[in-house]
Image (cartoon, grey):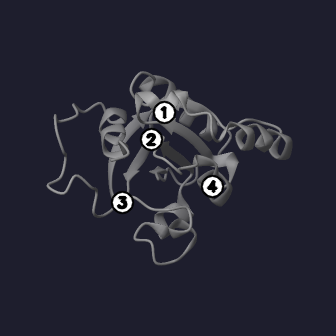
C-alpha cells in the first residue's frame, strides 16, 4: 500500500481512518475529492496502483485523467525496485511533485542520481515533499506549479496521484 488514499484525504483536510481504507486494502477505481486553494477548485484524484509502463498505455483505468492532469503527485513508498523517476519521465517533470508516502522513503536514495540528472535537462529539480509531515507544503507546491497557468473558464484543476 503506497499511501495515496491517505494522502488524498489529508489534502482534503479529512481524517484518515485507522486500518485499511478498503476491504482489499487497495484502491480499485479512480475517485476524487475537491479542495479549494486560493479560491480555485482542485480535483485531487486517487488512483489504483500502476507501474510506469501501465500509465503509458491506454488501458490503465485512469489514463484519460492522467493525460488531462495539471499536476501529478508521484507517490513513492520506497518499495524494493520502485523508482519515482520512471513516472516523472513518463508524465513530464514540469508537472510532477514526488511525494514520499512512508517515513522510511526519506532514506531511499536509490533514485537520486537520476533525480539530479533531471535538472540538467529541465533546469530545475522536481519538488520532493513528505506526505506525513508536509501536507501544507504539498498544497503550496501545487499552487506554485499552477501559478502561471491561465484560469480558463473557471474549470477546476486536476491533481492526480500515481
User: Percent x, y for residue 8?
Assistant: 35, 42
Q: Earlier in the sequence, mark 1 or mark 3?
A: 3
User: Percent x, y for residue 33?
Assistant: 32, 47
Distance of label 4 from label 3 (alpha carbons): 17 Å
Q: Which mark is residue 77?
A: 2
81 or 102: nearer the eye? 81
Q: Residues within 10 Å of mark 4 (few under 14, many from 20)?
A: some
Distance of label 1 from label 3 (alpha carbons): 20 Å
Query: Total marks drawn?
Result: 4
Which residue is label 3 attached to?
Answer: 48
Callout 4: SS:
helix
Residue at x-position 32% and y-position 36%:
12
User: Percent x, y for residue 118?
Assistant: 77, 44
Q: Which mark is residue 86?
A: 4
Distance of label 2 from label 4 (alpha carbons): 14 Å
Q: Indicate whether 56 appears above or below 95.
A: below
Q: Are marks 1 and 3 in contact (CB under 8 Å)?
A: no
Distance of label 1 from label 2 (alpha carbons): 6 Å
Q: Residues within 10 Å of mark 3 (few under 14, many from 20)?
A: some
Q: Earlier in the sequence, mark 4 or mark 1?
A: 4
Q: Nearer the viewer, mark 1 or mark 3?
A: 1
Q: Residues within 10 Å of mark 2 (few under 14, many from 20)?
A: many
Q: Residues within 10 Å of mark 1 (few under 14, many from 20)?
A: some
Camera sees residue 123:
yes
User: Percent x, y for residue 148?
Assistant: 68, 40
Q: Are marks 2 and 4 in contact (CB under 8 Å)?
A: no
Residue at x-position 74% and y-position 39%:
113
Amino acid at each position: 500500500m503506497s499511501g495515496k488514499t491517505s494522502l488524498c484525504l489529508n489534502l482534503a483536510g479529512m481524517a484518515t481512518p485507522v486500518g485499511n481504507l478498503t476491504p482489499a486494502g487497495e484502491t480499485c477505481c479512480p475517485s476524487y475529492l475537491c479542495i479549494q486553494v486560493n479560491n480555485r477548485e482542485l480535483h485531487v484524484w486517487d488512483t489504483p496502483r500502476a507501474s510506469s509502463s501501465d500509465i503509458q498505455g491506454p488501458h490503465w483505468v485512469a489514463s484519460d485523467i492522467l493525460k488531462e492532469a495539471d499536476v501529478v503527485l508521484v507517490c513513492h513508498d520506497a518499495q524494493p525496485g520502485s523508482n519515482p523517476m520512471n513516472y516523472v519521465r513518463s508524465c513530464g517533470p514540469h508537472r510532477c511533485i514526488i511525494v514520499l508516502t512512508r517515513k522510511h522513503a526519506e532514506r531511499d536514495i536509490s533514485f537520486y542520481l537520476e533525480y539530479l540528472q533531471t535538472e540538467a535537462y529541465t533546469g530545475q529539480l522536481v519538488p520532493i515533499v513528505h506526505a506525513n509531515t508536509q501536507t501544507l507544503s504539498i498544497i503550496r507546491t501545487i499552487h506554485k506549479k499552477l501559478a502561471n497557468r491561465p484560469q480558463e473558464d473557471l474549470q477546476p484543476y486536476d491533481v492526480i496521484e500515481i
